[in-house]
Amino acid sequence: MNGMLVLPVAIPLITATLALLFRKSSVLQRWFGILGMAALLGSVMILFRDVYTDGIQVLQLGTWAAPFGITLVADMLTMLMLGISAIMGVVIGIYSLYDIDKERERFGYYPLLHILIMGVNGSFLTGDIFNLYVWFEVMLIASFILLALGNSKNQLQGALKYVFINLFSSLIFLFGVAMLYGMTGTLNMADLAVRLPMVENTGLVTTTAMLFMVSFGIKAAVFPLFFWLPASYHTPPVAISAIFGGLLTKVGVYALIRVFTLLFTQDSTHNEYLHTILLWVGGFTMVIGVLGAASHMEFRKILSFHIVSQIGYMIMGLAFNTAMGIMGAIFYVLHNILAKSNLFLISGIAQRLLGTFELKKMGGLYKHYPFLAVLFLISAFALAGFPPLSGFWAKLSLVKAGLSIEQYVITGVAILVGLLTLFSMTKIWLSAFWGTVPEETPEHFGKIPLFGAGKLYILMIPVMIIAGLIIAVGLYAQPLLELCMTAAEQLLDPSVYIEAVLGPQ
Amino acid sequence: MDTILPIIAGAIFATGIYLLLRRSLILTIIGIILISNSVNLALFSLGRLSTENPPLIKAGSLEPLAPFANPLPQALILTAIVIGFGLLAFALALAYRSYRELGTVDQDELLEDAEDTSAAIVPRNDFKKGGDA
């Protein structure tokens, strides 16, 4: 029992409540925002130490013993995800200080951001499948409002697509939960892991697994269920785009990793079938996503298609179903959240300077803002997988994992997609950074400094923090790789998880 | 009950899918409502319906009178209904807002891609003044 486990959920809730109470004062809201996120990061670090030294931490809420009450569980995967979610919270909190306008602030941007983080953290922590559904809904409703907040025409169009597909996916998820409950009579994930192998009707188990795959697949935006993502993620303000693009889709990936390593692990032909489907899905997601990115000329749309493409790598790692593959997938998730959000944040700064997201109307950033160009290069090269940045290690582990189990075709596809990623990053670089300064630029272009009057540095600080993390992870990857390996080993041996939750069997 | 309820749930689900595929936004929302209810019914019938004693503990005794009905599915459905209600309220408000803003509920017209997405961002012309951030 570790009472600390409740903090990653409680702190955002308290912060959101305070921010709501002082809704009229934007200064207080901003301070609560930053302090709340910092407190969250602190609590996650303390919790991380516990998990690192003592193994999986468990909290039975209301002291109801395991299969009956709601259990919070923190294993290494949970902690890594919580850590990255807290880091994202801090940087987005800072970025929002400048990026979010007074109107949105007045209509509750900050409380919603914290509720969103609470939903994300709850999804990572919970050990109960129905509770996971509830946290998903908390996250969804906050994301719905954040996406639609502002009511501009584009945002409403984006929000409509996002809302309906996600409502549908939640209902499929709920139906999957109902099936699990009908077959086993329990909802605790550890207890389910014990009882599912005893279910005689393996066909029904596979059907349920497919329901989960479709539902989480929609949330993670995998092929062929991704169309809503590039249609909506480029519409809200950049701070919101960045946290959606970085964090939200990865919650879907987390849920996929969790259910396909803990629940649906029975040795049967059905199961091999599931992993083959995942492998194909991963491959197609990579290719289609990157082709979509190659065909667009809008900064944030290119980035949105890249989210889809990168999800494919994570799904591929999961489908390999080896320690190396899952480690690669987890590392990829962490690296991708950093690189992707940073690119979104940079696109926001570029838009503030040039007044547009259309690549054809952009240019001259390298000439006037070389430092911004360097930061973009770091993130873009990390995304494409250049050594010595974080993306290199992520791709290297996945390629190694693929070669070691002789999946040559998909590994080849993964490498090829890396090249295409570089191609579309070059496209942004060529037109927005190297291109000639377009004729119609806002008056301040080239005159306003990144640091100094105009307060653009508020936007630059988060970008520099993340770029620093990308370089640090790239140059000194071993500790993080080891942590991901620990997480993968814990995932592949569910008995540790089960024992931690249900006690010795 | 054990055979009728799943059939009803299935029929409602199918109707919901049909409505979901229609072009009008309002019909889509009604489709989601129907699917949501059919999933609740499925949850109910998968929780093993039985006509037994209510799961209440009489004063003085320590456990309910066996055999008692399973109360958990009802708790689950109640939660699901409340969540579904909140989400649908939001979806309706969004649909209304879109109708006011875009003047139609036909999805083909509603979802035509907008040209310039930069418009979504409120321009800040406070660079010269030093900003108020």
Image (tube, rainbow, N blue to C red):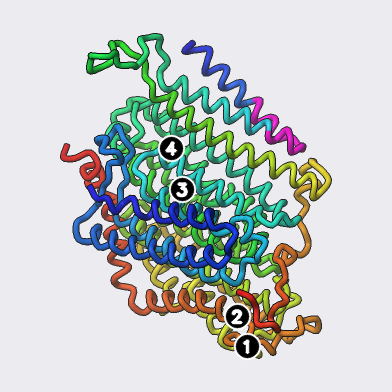
Residue highlighted by disc 3: A278
Kind of residue sitting beneath label 4: Ala
Circle number at residue A149: none
Query: Going from the N terminus, do you reach mark 2 or mark 3 first?
Result: 3
- Judge if badges 3 and 4 mark residues of a common chain: yes
Where does the magenta region start and end? B15-29
Name the mark on residue A209: 4
Q: Nearer the viewer, mark 2 or mark 3?
A: 2
Across and down, in percent, residue A437 comes to 74, 86
For label 2, the SS is: loop
In the drawing, does residue A356 fall left or right of residue A170? right
Rendered view: A477 above or below B88 = below
Query: Are there few (<14), some (14-19), or many (20+) residues within 10 Å of tag 4?
Result: many
Q: Residues within 10 Å of mark 1 (few under 14, many from 20)?
A: some
Frontmost residue, B99 versus B31: B99
Question: Are labels 4 and 2 assigned to the same chain?
Answer: yes
Marks 1, 4 in one chain: yes
For badge 1, the amino acid type reads: Pro
Task: Tell me which label, 1 or 4, sits earlier in the chain.
Answer: 4
User: How far is mark 4 from mark 2, CA to CA?
Assistant: 48 Å
Q: Which residue is mark 1?
A: A449
In this rendering, the label closer to the viewer, 3 or 1: 1
